[in-house]
Amino acid sequence: MSFDTALDDAALARLYTDARTHGTWLDKPVSDAQLRQLYELTKWGPTAMNFSPLRVRFVQSPEARARLLPLMADGNRAKTGLAPAVAILARDVDFHQHLPTLAPHREGLREQLADKLAMREGASTLNAGLQIGYFILAVRSLGLDAGPMGGFDAPGVDAEFFAGTGLKSMVVCNIGHGDPAALRPRAPRLDFDTACAIL
């Protein structure tokens, strides 16, 4: 399938130009079905050789929230406690174990990467970072708002939620319907000529 028409202005505004990072939330729930749909959209974004190292833990129960909140930075704790949904976005350094399923056209790739931890660290960081971007856009595409944060005790989160695995947390993202009344004026962005060059 090929797409040769641009999204309309309303869709572009929802995904990019009008979308904001939220920290204050309206009292509207986010359903498990929405969280499932969110991942089902995210997973289709491209990664190198279909590595797909992003792993998501949706922290929804009161017990799971109680484990996460002490590990959030002071400025992020209250907003995370009040968010309708919370996702820990992590990278799996052992992503190669899934390559027979994800990249059947690259026979033997799992075995080639098995003893290349440094390469897997770099590949998982880059590609999970790409997938986090897709995740945020997927949140917005479903009519929700995202509040991604890096302010948390990552080693503590890894020990609490990912002990004994190859998962390493990268971002905690609050999800819900943001309160537009609580937003600050939008910060500027660099213009094309400052950030780009056509060579």
Image: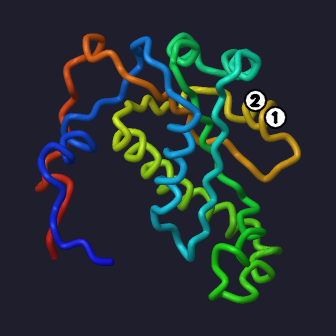
Q: Is residue 25 left or right of residue 48?
A: left
* Rendered location of residue 39, percent (x, y): 54, 49
What SS does tag 2 mark?
helix
Q: Quadrant of residue 152?
A: top right
* Rendered location of residue 10, percent (x, y): 15, 43
Numbered disc total: 2
Q: Residue at x 73, y 23 (%)?
A: 64
* Rendered location of residue 162, percent (x, y): 79, 41
Q: Residues within 10 Å of mark 2 (few under 14, many from 20)?
A: some
The residue under label 2 is 156
Q: Nearer the viewer, residue 103 or 172?
A: 103
Separation (CA) of disc 2 from disc 1: 5 Å
* Rendered location of residue 144, percent (x, y): 38, 32
Q: Residue at x 35, y 29 (%)?
A: 21
Q: Is residue 190 left or right of residue 166?
A: left
92 w.r.t. 182: above or below: below
83 w.r.t. 1: above or below: above
Q: Residues within 10 Å of mark 1 (few under 14, many from 20)?
A: some
Q: Residue at x 71, y 64 (%)?
A: 95
Q: What is the three-letter code of the residue carrying label 2? A: Gly
What SS does tag 1 mark?
helix
The quadrant of the rendering that contains the C terminus is bottom left
Task: Check if mark 2's residue and mark 1's residue have beta carbons within 8 Å.
Answer: yes
* Label drawn at residue 53: none
Q: Is residue 180 left or right of residue 149?
A: left
The residue under label 1 is 159
Q: Nearer the viewer, residue 52 or 185?
A: 52
Q: What is the three-letter code of the residue carrying label 1? A: Ala
